Image (tube, rainbow, N blue to C red):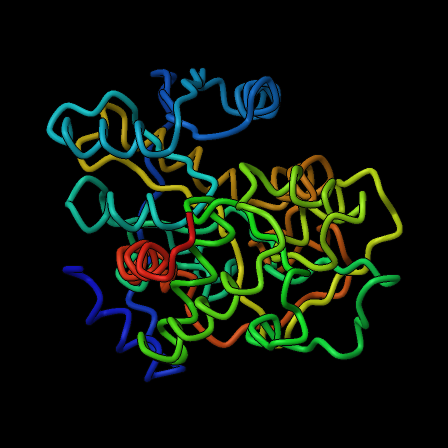
Amino acid sequence: MKRALALACVLVLAAACDKTPENVAAPAVRHEPVVVYASYGGDYLPTLFESFTASTGIPVTVRHRREEQIVAEVIANSASPPADVLLTRSVHGMWLAADEGALRPLQSPGLSESVPEWLRDPDGYWVATGYTPIGIAIDPERSDADAISGYNDLARPEFESKLCLSAPWNAVNRNLVANLVATHGTREAEMIVRGWTANMALPAFDSERDLLEAISAGRCAVGLVSEFAVATHVSTLLRFVRPEPAHVVTEAVGIGRHARYPANARILLDWLVGEEAQREHAKIYGFYPSNSRVSGGSNQSVPTFDRNAGVAGAFDVDAINLAERAGWR
């Protein structure tokens, strides 16, 4: 965790200075193609980028891989990266790429004006493109939603054989446990997670969707999920409790340290966090926009947060090891 100290400084100093240069000259636009490595999107991202190409003349090629694969390839080939832009559905992969020196600092003054500090890398290597809160899905017929206000409540004895979890390596769980470690310390966070595993009604599900289907079918009463997953679930009977302050799953974008066309990659990054793309992304994907000037997301009530999104990356290894010790498999 080479950059954890920088993050700690951000957490301690709530009003850190913005060191982004204010008078960076806009580069002349040339039409060299930008290659994007993305861990999500399917047919959606190429369609989204058609608008970018139409407005700038810059072609975009999207290559889809699993997050672990694209991050590993960008790190292993940082001197000659297979892509100019890295786009991930969670921040821990982007944090690792930055930690290993595979990303370049973002020289973009507009980012500090449109994206809140908590959604930007403390060292300036990546920026969020969207986020979704992590909360608790509840079957109101089998559990009292008013009795649950925080993540640690699910470790209480009354939830024995009522709790369902998805796999610990899913982004929603890795991010949540990493934030618990940062908030409570390793020992207390592990006690919470051990309480969860003791209360599990069934083995961990592969996905949030499978977990929500199990709750809808009455196989368990509560589960830890993202707000996005609940909003896109077919059942409208489930309640969703969002703790305040909440923890989040954060999408992120960065530029390869030795990107072939860094100027065009930066133009694309700025466009991704601009109002047009952010509005479209929030409408199609249901994530909250990272651009504070754009409203959207699966719930119009904007959640509150008390820490930098990079915590999920800085404490990711701790989260994985903790889940393993707690028997969460």
* Horizontal arrangement in the rendering, residue 119 relative to residue 75 (left or right): right
237 and 36: which one is in front?
Answer: 237
Residue 47 % position (x, y)? 61, 19
Location of residue 136 (image quadrant): bottom right
Residue 90 % position (x, y)? 44, 46
| Residue drawn where x is 57% and y is 38% of the image | 207
Q: Is residue 69 above or below residue 198?
A: above
- Give the number of marks: 0
39 and 173: which one is in front?
Answer: 173
* Horizontal arrangement in the rendering, residue 273 relative to residue 293 (left or right): left
* Horizontal arrangement in the rendering, residue 212 relative to residue 46 (left or right): right
* Horizontal arrangement in the rendering, residue 15 relative to residue 228 (left or right): left
| Residue drawn where x is 41% and y is 45% of the image | 169
| Residue drawn where x is 64% and y is 73% of the image | 243
160 and 104: which one is in front?
Answer: 160
Q: Is residue 5 above or below residue 91?
A: below
Pick out the residue farthest to the left.
Answer: 79
Location of residue 314 (image quadrant): bottom left
67 and 205: which one is in front?
Answer: 205
Location of residue 133 (image quadrant): bottom right
Quadrant containing the N terminus in the rendered view? bottom left
| Residue drawn where x is 39% and y is 22% of the image | 65
Residue 324 % position (x, y)? 33, 54
Residue 132 % position (x, y)? 60, 53
